[in-house]
Amino acid sequence: MAYKTIIGLEIHVELSTKHKIFCNCPNEFGADANTLVCPTCLGLPGSMPILDKEALEYAIKAGIAFDGEISKLIKMDRKHYYYSDLPKGFQVSQAEIPFCNGGYLEIELESGTKKINLERIHIEEDTGKQIHSEEGETLLDFNRSGVPLIEIVTKPDMNSAEEAKLFLDKLRATLKYIEVSNVKMEEGSLRCDVNINVVNSDTGEKSNISEIKNLNSFRGVVKAIEFEEKRHIDLLESGSNTKKETRRWDEAKTATILMREKGDASDYRFVVDGDIPPVKIANEWIDEIKATLPELPQDKKTRFVESYGLSSYDAGVLTQTKELSEFFEETLKHINDSKLVSNWIMGDVLRRLNDDEIEINQSNITPIALADLLALVRDDKINNNTGKKVLKEIFDTGKSPEVIVKEKGLIQISDEGEIKEIIKKVLDDNEQSIIDFKNGKDRAIGFLVGQVMKASRGKANPQLANKMLLEMIKER
Amino acid sequence: MDLTSLKAWEMKEKIINKEISCKELIEAHIRKIEKEDPDINAFITLNKDEALRESDKIDAKIKNGQDIGLLGGLPIGIKDNIVTKNIKTTCGSKMLENYVSPFDASVIEKIKYNDGIIIGKTNLDEFAAGDSTETSYFGPTKNPINKNVVAGGSSGGSAAAVAANMAALSLGTDTGGSVRQPASFCGIVGIKPTYGMVSRYGVVPVSDTLDQVGVFGRDVKDATLILNSITGYDKKDSTSSKKSDSVVSLANFKEDKDYLDGIKIAIPKEYMDLVPADKKAQEQFNTAMKVFEKSGAKIEIVSIPHLKYAAEAYYIIMTSELSSNMARYDGIAFGHRAEEYETLDELYVNSRTEGFGNEIKTRIMAGTYALTGAQNKELYQKAMRVRRLLQEDYDKVFASYDVILSLTSKDLPFEFNLTENNLIESYRANIYTAPANLVGLCAMSIPIGNVDGLPVGMEITGDRFKEENIIKAGLGYERAVL
C-alpha cells in the first residue's frame, strides 16, 4: 500500500539582539550561570517588562523576508504553565494575533521548485535553562530567560524527511542572510519540533499526528521523521492507530519516546499581558526595515539564473548561504566564466566543504585562488585532473595555485613533439594493444591513453594526447 | 501640642520655618505608633532606625539653608505591596513573609527624592485582594475611629495609619476601591489617580490593567501634596502615561476660589438602583448634595447603562489577571518553599498550599476557571468587551459633566468576620468604586459625615487625566462645610 507522509514544523529561533526582549540584560550565549539577569527576567515581584524595539525590528525583518503579512498592531499575551525554568509561571507570547501571518519559502527538489507555506510567526520570550547535575540536583540558569524568540509555524506542506531538511536549510540560510539570528542548533538558537502523520493514499485513512520534541540537529530531524514515518505506517497496517501524542527524540536509542498523549495537554489560559500596551506598527517603519534587508536567497537565485545562465538547481545551491553566493560572485570578478566556476564550486569545492563540515569562509580557499586555478585549467596550462589535485592542495595548505603548480612541476605538456615522443614509446611497448584496436576492440584505445598519461605523470594535455594517439596508430 | 495631629502641609511648614525639627516630628510619630499600633495593627514592619537617620539628614539640609523636597521630612506609610530595597515587602502573605526586594519601586524613589521619610510598611489584605484587611497573614487592622469595625481594605493599614496620626501621609494601591473604601471607612481622603498617572514599577500586581497607586491624607490638600510628588511618566512602566507629567500641581489650586460654582455634576441612577446603599449613609450623601447645590453646582441624574455588568466584569478580569500574577509564587526562586516534597509538582502544590491564604486561593481558582477552555471566551473575553462598552458610557457622561458623585461604599464600616460567609455579597459592594478601575478614571473619597459614629465617604469621579476636576470639587466641598 502507498502512504503519503505529512509534515509540519514549528521552529523556535533566538534573535541575536543586543538585549533581552523585556529588559536591558545582554543577550549572550555562554556566560557564567545567572550573571545576565535582573529583576525583570527573574520575574521578581513588582518588576515590569519593557518591549525591546530591536527585538520587534528583527522579528518583523524575518516576517518580511518570508513574505508574510505584518500585523498593524502587536499585542502580547501570557501563556501559563508551571516549569522551574519559567520564573513568572507564564511565558509572554502571542496567542490569537501573531505579528506575522502567512509567508512561504521555496525549496529545490529534483522534480522542481516546491513552495512551503507558513501558518504564522509570533514573537515570545525564551525560558531559563535546567542543568541536571551528576548528584541528581536540578540547577537553574536564567541567563537565557527573556531572550527574544520567534516561533515559525509551517503549514503541513512537507512530505518527506528530505523536504523537511531542505526547508530547514533554506530557513537557516534566509535567517543568516538577514542577520537576525546565529541559527546554531547546537547552541539552541534554532530549535525545531516536528508534527507528522501519514495517510493511506488508497483508503484515505490517516494516522494521528505526533509532535516530536527535543531535536538537536538537522540530522536528528531527518532521522526522527524517518523513524516516525515507519512507526505511523506500522500503526496503520496493524490497525492500532494511537491518539495524538507528544514524543521525544532519543538520540542514543535513535527512536522517539512517548511523552504524553495530547488529550491531557495543558490549557495555557491565555490572558492579555496588561503590562505591555499594544504597539502600533507604522507602515513607514515596515518600509524602513524593508530597505535594510539584503538581497534574499530567493531573489539572488533568480538573478543567478538570469545573469549567469545557471540552472535553477545550481543557482539554488550557490545561494544556499550568503557566504557561498558571495564567494561565487567574487570569483567571477577574476575569471569571467560562470559555468566553469559554478561547476567547480558545485563539484569539488562543496564536496570538500561537506567532508570537512565547514563553511566556505572557514576554509583555506579564496575567490582569487579558485579563479587563478580555473584560469590554468581553462588555458590548458594544467588539465582537469591536475586541477583537482591542486584544489586539494589549496584546501590543505592555503598556497596559491601558481606556487603549487611550480613546486610540483604540474604544468601541462601541450608540446606536440614532447607528446609524440611519449606516445611513440607507449606504442612501441604495447604492440598487442595496437593489434587489438585494429581488430575492433575499442577498449584498447582507453588503455593506451591511460599509459600515455601515466608516462607523462598526468601532465599531458588529454585532448591533444588522444587526438595524436589515434593518428599515430593509424600510421602503424 | 501633639505634632502628629497636624495636617501634613502644616507639619512641613513648621519644619521649613524651623519651629520644629524633622527629628522631633519623626520621634513623635514613632512614639504614637509604639503606643497605638499594638492595638490597631496598621504596620507590618516599622522603619524606625532608618527614619531617624533620614530625619537627621533633613535637619542638616535645613540648617545648611538647602531647599527641601515636596514631602520635606514628612513620615509616610507605604502599603506593603510596594517594594522597598532595605525593608521587607510581605504583601501581607506568608508567601513573602521574609522577602526583601533588591530594588525600590519607582514611587519609593520619588518619595525619597522628594525628601519623604518612610516610617513603615503598612498592613493589607493578602496580596491586596480583599476589602477589610482581614485576610492579612499578619492579622487584621482595626479602624482607629471605632476599633470594633474594620479599617476597610485592601489598603487598610495605610488608611488607619493616617487616621490614627501614626503617619502624616501614606501610599496605597487601588484595584477596585482599595484606597477609596478604606479612606471612607477611616474618615480621611483617598485618591486613586487615573490609570497611567503613577508608575506601577515595583508595585506587586493584583491586576495589571486595573491597579493604580493611590494616596491617603487627612484633607484634600494633604492628599494632593503626596499625589503631586509621585505622578509622572516612568520609562520602567510602559503603561505609565506621558500625559501624567505636571497634571496635578498644588500650585494650580488657589485658596480663595469657590470651585463648586458652576461645576457640572452627574449622579448615575444605576448605583442606587442596582445596589442600594445603607439608608443612613444615603441620607448623608443627600445632605452633601445640598451643599454642592447651594454652592452653585449643577446636578443631574444620568444613566450609565453598562454598569449593570460592571461588578461581574470586574471580578472576572481582576481574578483572571490575579491568577496570572500569582503564578510566579511557585517556591522556586523566591518566597515560601514547602519543606516536604518529593516531586517538582509537589514542591509547587505544597508551597502554594502553605504560602497562600484562603481568599487568595479562592480568587486564583476563580480566575483560573475564567481563563480555562471555553470560559476564556465566555467569561474573560466577554468581560473585556463589557469594559470597552463601559468606557464608551463614561466618555459620553464626561463629554457633558465635570465629575460624577456617589457614595464611596454602599456600606458603613462593618464588624470583623462578616464577609467570610457573604463572599458574593461582599464582592458586589465594590460596585461604586470598581468602574473607575475598569475604565481607568481618577476618583477620590472624601469624608462627608458620620452615622452612629462611623465615617461616611463620598466618591468624586473624574475623567482620565482630569485629576484637577476632582481635586477642585473636593477642595470646594471642604471649604463649603468648614
Image (cartoon, rainbow, N blue to C red):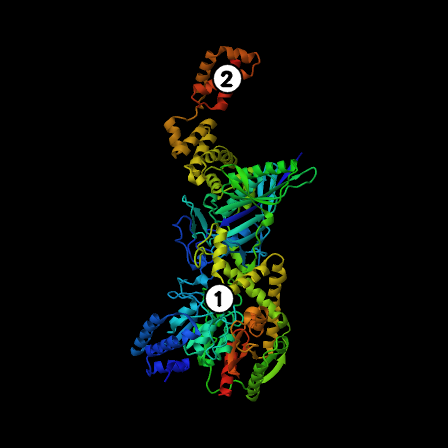
Residue at disc 1, secondary structure: helix
x%, y% of residue A135?
Answer: 40, 44
Q: Residue at x 53, y 56 (%)?
A: A80
x%, y% of residue B202?
Answer: 44, 65
Is A416 placed above or below B331 here? Answer: above
Query: Which quarter of the picture shows residue B32?
Result: bottom left
x%, y% of residue A232?
Answer: 61, 38
**Residues at discs 1 and 2 in contact (Cβ within 8 Å):** no
Q: Which mark is residue B360?
A: none
C-alpha distance separating marks 1 and 2 = 95 Å
In front of the other: B330 or B175? B330
In front of the other: A360 or B341? B341
Q: Is residue A294 visible?
A: no
Disc 2 marks a residue whose amino acid type is Phe
Q: Chain of mark 2?
A: A
Residue behind mark 1: B126
Query: Which quarter of the picture shows residue B420?
Result: bottom right
Disc 1 marks a residue whose amino acid type is Glu
In front of the other: A31 or A254? A254
Q: Which mark is residue A447?
A: 2
Relative horizontal placement of residue B104, taking residue B321 as reference (left or right): left
Residue at disc 2, secondary structure: helix
Is B221 placed above or below B243 here? Answer: below
x%, y% of residue A51?
Answer: 49, 59
Q: Is residue A414 visible?
A: yes
Q: Chain of mark 1?
A: B
10 Å crowding of disc 1: few (<14), some (14-19), many (20+): many
10 Å crowding of disc 2: few (<14), some (14-19), many (20+): few
